[in-house]
Image (cartoon, rainbow, N blue to C red):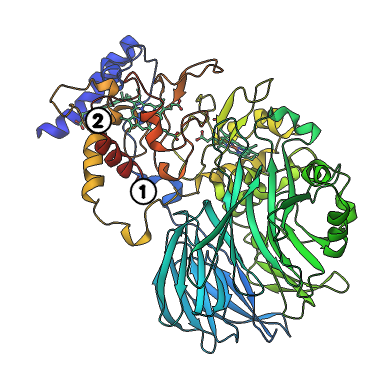
Amino acid sequence: MKLKPFILVTTPLILAGVGAATGVSVHERRMSGLPQLGYVSCIHCHQRGLDTLPWAKPRPHHDAPGGIAVSPDGKTLFIALDDRDEVAEADLASFTVSRRTKVPGGPFGLALDAVGKRLFVACRNHDRVAVLDTLDLKEQASIDVGIRPTDIAYCKTAEGERLIVPNSGSDDISVLSVSPLLELTRSAAGREPYAVAVSGDGRRVCIANRMAVHDQILSQPYSEVTVIDPASGHILAREALQSAHLAEGITDVPTRGWTLNSVVRVSNLVPITQVKDGWVMSSGVAIARGNGEVTQVPLDEANAYFPDPSGVVASPDGKRAYVASAGSDVVTVIDLDKLAAWLAQADEAERGGAMVNMALSYRYVVARIPTGCDPQHLALSPDGSRLFVAERLEDRVLVVDTASLKPVGRIVLGDGGLDDPIRLGERVFTRARYTFQGQFSCRSCHPDGHVDGLSYDFDGAGVGDNLLANRSLCGVAGTEPFKWNGKNPTLQYQDGPRFARVLMRTDEIPQPQLDQLATYIKHLPPTRTIPWSRVGQPLTPAEERGRKLFFATKRTDGTPIPRALQCQTCHRPPLYTDRLLTSVGTKGSQDTSGVFDTPHLIGVGAMAPYLHDGRAKTLEEIWTIYQTDDKHGVSSYWSKLQLNDLVEYLKTL
Ligand code: HEC
Ligand code: HEC
Ligand code: HEC
């Protein structure tokens, strides 16, 4: 027998023997650096390869409609099918799909040129924009943009045709010329630029940023609306939507000079137990009237909530707006004349407090149209007579007659995928019906299964104590136990009784749905943090230097770093966690314990803010501001440049 197989066979036997005798073996204590370690299984540290995890395996794909666009003659609807890598074309006389074409890379955002000859497609998974000829639906050109583009707008300027693309993963905005197809500028946006709208005169383009940012842990979050001059690509303004986040939809209102945003107002700093008073989240629209003032008004009513507002469109005459509520399967119809009348007579205090005035929405909400599961993108026919609603988890597009506000048909793309447990779980995830009065869904805090960038007060009695940073569910499979304190052994437990008690204030999610939910979460792949073009490519020299620091066993001067303080001991590949509880000196004044479950680091570049309470706004801050004593890895010997390298490396995980 050769040495290695011999060691591999006998060591476990010896370890098991010693382990049985001592409770836990010397090996595990030595390797974890934890002298007090209790029982742990070998696979805590000797993890299987990532390719054995549920999200790495093939799964069923569905005809889920993403972005939709109506041709200028009103005869055709184009539908992005990101999960299929296809774009579908539907005939609006018969409401049937006429053609489908392959567009690799997760087509999600769509825009047409002024005459409907070219279709521009933002491909979220491959970081590119494709140009299709609408005659034969063939791809004519393609260009790389920033990470994860989610939308695209076309406009004509004095300097030529332009495409504006929000890159949700790299937090920037690409401005492209069309002929030739070139990237002219790439400017920094807020966090997660998501949707884009062109003003009627084509001079301003507004971009909604989905994730909020906050200046300090205890300050109110706000979401940025980035305003760009499409001709030059220059930033004209950065407007703040105060206390708002998840701005997923944006539209220009013709004839009025307004911009409307769908927003969630979040009270993340008040104890979540206030759910029963309706204080945690409210859905609404933000109205920018071009005078520098933004007013947010509610869509909710006193006992009826319309969570996860997503797509928003306004009629060509500027008289109506439609907002999709993805969590409650409804499209809300707003009478903009009535809204304008209210805005004209309300004083500053009334406008400022509008979002919490639950008796306001009846003044301008004229209808709620029920839809299929998870309505997100909306589009109107050019004459405004037909509203199209992409029912994402139903694989259909609903067609509504805007005069009667009644459904007149459905474009069927697929069968809804009800035989796929992952899909069923996604339905549970997006539906608000499991929370008290349907106030929010899992998606309200975990959009696309990810984080919303906020910290929540889950247990505290007073405002802002016991804050816990949100955690991403993307790539979470195999990293149990869950929660920062590592108290939840399974996903079912995480989302079961305690969730019902603390968050939902209502009955528990029934067991079959709970299992579907867990299945869905386990299949969420980690968030990609590097450009698609770099996937599988070697690390850059800076990232490679950072990798060496991460795996360092000695300081630059050669002094050894104790095993317990090496990054790789706790953040052990391939999941970059040992799934054990440790203290790294981050206990805050409000924390009852300083012991936390070592977080996994896959996709960590996208998970800001950092540490259990979200105190570190960036990866750098973990060590520059929040470590003074070398308890969280030995960082005192790093130069600023070395820290930069380490951060570059962490962003590739
Ligand atoms: C706390 C983490 C941890 C636990 C738990 C653990 N190990 Fe290890 N083990 C390590 C580390 C670290 C090494 C060093 C080599 C490496 O990094 O893979 C190692 C090395 C080994 C090796 C030597 C093979 C090699 O790659 O050099 C064997 C065999 C082994 N472990 C078996 C086990 C068995 C069996 C168990 C369960 C009884 C176990 N280990 C539990 C962390 C752990
Ligand atoms: C009000 C915002 C909010 C809502 C709604 C919400 N979560 Fe969370 N979620 C959080 C926060 C904050 C954490 C971190 C809490 C902690 O670690 O104690 C978290 C943690 C988790 C974790 C643990 C992840 C890990 O790596 O430890 C899972 C799983 C999870 N949520 C699933 C869900 C599911 C499923 C739903 C819907 C049933 C849901 N969440 C609804 C905010 C929310
Ligand atoms: C003793 C175990 C241990 C060591 C060694 C260690 N970490 Fe950590 N790490 C943790 C724990 C526990 C947390 C969570 C602390 C908190 O939230 O307050 C954490 C948090 C982090 C986070 C933030 C994750 C998030 O989602 O907020 C990053 C990034 C990180 N560690 C990287 C590193 C690097 C790089 C090193 C080496 C310089 C290192 N860690 C060394 C245990 C360790």
**Secondary structure beneath label 1:** helix
Front of the two marks 1 and 2:
2
Q: Image height check: is 493 above or below 183? A: above
Q: Rate crowding at label 1 as few (under 14), some (14 to 19) or many (20 or more) other CA atoms within 10 Å.
A: few
Amino acid at circle 2: Trp
In percent of width and height, residue 545 lies at: 21, 42
Determine the residue positioned at 46% across, 23% down: 596
Residue farthest along the bottom direction in this orientation: 135
Question: In the rendered image, is residue 377 in sight?
Answer: no
Which mark is on residue 638?
2
Q: Please state, as top left, top right, bottom left or bottom right, where the N terminus lies in the image.
A: top left
Q: Which residue is mark 1?
A: 51
Q: Image height check: is 144 above or below 358? A: below
**Secondary structure beneath label 2:** loop
Spatial separation of the CA atoms under disc 1 and disc 2: 34 Å
Q: Is mark 2 within 8 Å of ligand 3?
A: no
Q: Please state, as top left, top right, bottom left or bottom right, where the C terminus lies in the image.
A: top left
Determine the residue positioned at 15% across, 21% down: 559
In this picture, residue 520 sits left or right of residue 382: left
Q: Rate crowding at label 2 as few (under 14), some (14 to 19) or many (20 or more) other CA atoms within 10 Å.
A: some
Amino acid at circle 1: Asp
Determine the residue positioned at 65% across, 23% down: 459
In percent of width and height, residue 505 lies at: 75, 31
Question: In the rendered image, is residue 167 in sight?
Answer: yes
* In the foreground, 192 or 570: 192
Residue farthest along the left direction in this orientation: 2
* In the foreground, 7 or 111: 111
Tell me which corner region of the image, top left, top right, bottom left or bottom right, holds residue 146. bottom left
Marks 1/2 in contact by CB < 8 Å: the verdict is no
Q: Image height check: is 549 above or below 385? A: above
In percent of width and height, residue 163 lies at: 51, 73
